[in-house]
Amino acid sequence: MWKKEYVEPPKPIFHFGERNSQMSHTRIRVKFSNLNFHLFNYNLIDSPNCQHCDLSETPNHYFLICAQYAQERAEMIDKIRYILQKNNLNDKINLELLVHGSKKLSYISNSKLFNAVHIYIKKTCRNP
């Protein structure tokens, strides 16, 4: 007899936003994006490195490190800090928060957080 494996349904927040931004965000979440690190892992390109700074272009690098996107990142982080402060949270802004949201936030606050991430994705024109 086959044992049916339980698959957790997607969280409603993952359906937030415009389709293109939502898809880019989801690709990063499921580790199948157009970031060089993911493309390299699937043997689609020769190097995992960022074209701007020659470090491995991981999701963490793209969202939190790459100097090429410093201005866009500062705007995103300011918006997210405001959302966290408004909800009396002192959580760190890290990759987990950016791609999955927070269980401590309401759907509306997570939507605002995801909106900030989607704006970052659009402004960087990286389309991961």
Image (tube, rainbow, N blue to C red):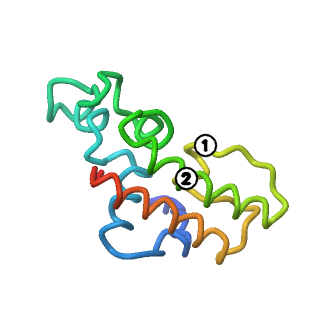
The residue shown at (80%, 50%) is 90
The residue shown at (40%, 59%) is 26
Quadrant of the snapshot with the N terminus: bottom left
Q: Residues within 10 Å of mark 1 (few under 14, many from 20)?
A: few
Hey, what amino acid is under mark 2?
A: Leu
Answer above or below: position of 81 versus 44. Answer: below
Where residue 13 appears, as percent x and y from the top left, is 55, 72
Answer above or below: position of 109 versus 75. Answer: below
Q: Nearer the viewer, residue 104 or 50?
A: 50
Q: Assign a secondary structure to mark 1.
A: loop
Decide: marks 2, 1 in contact (CB < 8 A)? yes
Where residue 124 appears, as percent x and y from the top left, is 33, 52
Residue highlighted by disc 1 = 94
The residue shown at (34%, 61%) is 122
Q: Which mark is residue 98?
A: 2
Where residue 49 appears, as percent x and y from the top left, is 28, 25
Residue that extends furthest to the front in the rendered view of this protein: 71
